[in-house]
Amino acid sequence: MINKVLIANRGEIAVRIIRSCHEMGMEVVTVYSTEDKDQLHVKLSDEAVCIGGPQSASSYLNMTNIINAAYATNCDAIHPGYGFLSENEEFANLVESCGLKFIGPSGGIISRMGDKIEARKLMEENGVPTVPGSPGVVEEIKTAEEICEKIGYPVLIKAAGGGGGRGMRRVYKKEDLKKEFENARNEAVSAFNNGDMYIEKLIINPKHIEIQILADSHGNVIHLGERDCSVQRKNQKMIEESPSAFVTEEMRQKMGEVAIKAAKACNYENAGTIEFVVDKDRNFYFIEMNTRVQVEHPVTEMVTGVDIIKEQLRIAGGLKLRYKQEDIKMNGFAMECRVNAENPLMNFMPSTGTVGFFNPPGGFRTRFDSYLYNGCKISPYYDSMVGKIIVQGDTRLETIKKMRRAIEETIIDGIKTNLALQYTILHDFDFIRGDYDTGFMEEKLDEMLEMMKRV
């Protein structure tokens, strides 16, 4: 069993993990940069260790300092959260080699599923549907041209070791292929130090549907239904909901079975997410596996009643899953809006400063995961997301109305946020009808920003 956990992260996910650890009777150690000495995760933990300066490379990405902090405080395990080192195979291997438990899959699995080409090949070998594309790494533009001619334009150029939309380019005609291929590769090298690229057929404006899975070390794997993450801006998710208004019960069952098959194919352990793109005819294709807890995991928790962080901790402690597939029921609808410190009316410029007054939303089936408090400092050194509003209702329309109300009562003085834009989305007729896909924000954004200016 795990008794003491070090959280190698910051912000809302660190606070979220602290809560589940304390409810399970586990002690918590947090790490922090000099910039974050007054942050909420530091205040709520049992112990806290400073691991470096403001820049992530000096602190939250400093593997040696994190391991030393775990040793100094006699921790049993390290939870990486999401981002930072959560999908870093070197860190996962280092944690295990030092006699600590990494709360997540092994470094080998992270490596295999983090390489999009290797993951794609594994899925194809195990009967998981994938988007038509290149069989492996595309080294030369001549090879790229031949593949594109074979599968047909438009195509999507993707970084093998990428994520978050970086190292990704859409190409609609042959004349643009060379330029976009080189741009994508340069961005991938800069972001991931990996210039390996591959090519897929571009499915125009698909739905982005993902399946949450849990897998223990005893061979048990279950899924917790789907999340619809199709409201995105520049491949960054904005609103997530579960269940999807687009997914039928038959499709949900089939996608869940395929997700379990995918997890078993790589001998997965812990919480993970299988991501799919779905075309207008409801054909779904594997695109990647996220080997960590997702930002949007709370919407699944709200509709299933399963605390995913607690399950991560139990699995890491060697325990069997508490649930069988037949135990998982999706009750009502849940929705999450990401709250970012940014100004949509100034090209989404990050907003930093001090929060003068903060009032979180409350009420029945309303949750706000955040690190904010009165006097909290919003730093320019880290991601702009400051929290997530999550609500649940009996129907999707009730859930939308509840989210509107939750946003209305959220007050965050001292910084700009994207809440007004999220509120505008919640009043869009197409969104209300569930008639949207990954092209939704590209089509609607200018109109929404004009509406916001007039208010």
Image: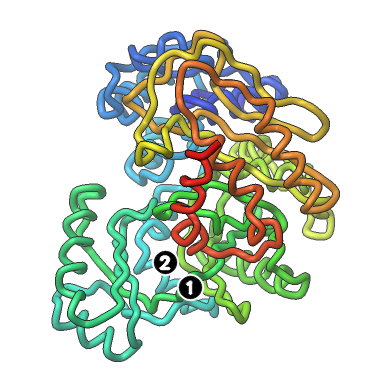
The x, y position of residue 355, in whole percent, is: 49, 14
Q: Which residue has dot 1 on it?
A: 123
Q: Position of residue 226 (x, y in %)?
A: 66, 59
Q: Residue 455: x percent and y percent?
A: 55, 36
Residue 365 visible? The answer is yes
State if disc 2 and disc 1 touch (CB < 8 Å). Answer: yes
Q: What residue type is labelled 2?
A: Ala
Q: In this view, does 175 lie above or below 453?
A: below
User: Residue at left 29%, top 71%?
Assistant: 198
Residue in front for this viewpoint, 307 or 199: 199
Relative horizontal placement of residue 379, taking residue 441 as reference (left or right): left
Residue 436, compared with residue 356, is above or below; it is: below
Position of 4 compared to 404: left or right? left
- Provide the secondary structure element on which disc 1 rests: helix
Residue 174 versus residue 427: which sits nearer the camera? 427
Q: What's the residue at 53%, 17% (across, down)?
A: 413
Mark number, residue 119: 2
Tell me if residue 101 can be seen. Answer: no
